[in-house]
Image (cartoon, grey):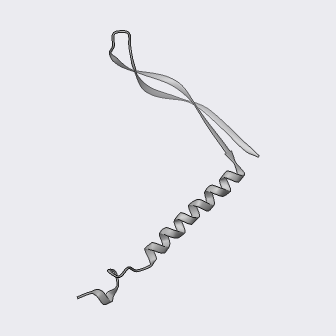
Amino acid sequence: MSRKKSRIAPRSIWVTDERGKLVSTTINERQIVICSAKYARKARQERLKVVNKTNKRIWSLSKDAKASSFG
């Protein structure tokens, strides 16, 4: 089952008017988000894999960080 949400949000953009000058104007932009349970599981696994890899690199000491290489 997938969920769909949308909202209208104001956004400021630059456009060129008839005289060739850039003018800032506000438009109403529709933002749409679609989420499915399958994609959520996949994204969670990928994030967990990256976090585990980062933690592994943080907690493993390199040759330069070992106390035996001091002095």
Taking the view exactly as shown, the residue that stands out farthest to the left is 71
Q: Position of residue 9 (x, y in %)?
A: 54, 30
Find residue 63 and report its image quarter: bottom left
Query: Residue at 43% across / 26% down in the picture?
Result: 13
Taking the view exactly as shown, the residue that stands out farthest to the right is 1
Query: Residue at 61% across / 55% down in the picture?
Result: 43
Q: Position of residue 44 (x, y in %)?
A: 62, 59
Q: Which of 61/24 is in front?
A: 61
Q: 10 left or right of 37?
A: left
Q: Which of 22/26 is in front?
A: 22
Q: Position of residue 60 (x, y in %)?
A: 44, 79
Which part of the image, by quadrant, shows the C terminus? bottom left
Q: 68 left or right of 4?
A: left
Taking the view exactly as shown, the residue that stands out farthest to the top is 18
Q: Position of residue 69 (x, y in %)?
A: 29, 87
Query: Residue at 62% across / 61% down in the picture?
Result: 45
**Above/below status of 45 relative to 26:** below
**Above/below status of 6 relative to 23:** below
Query: Residue at 36% across / 19% down in the picture?
Result: 23
Q: 52 left or right of 23?
A: right
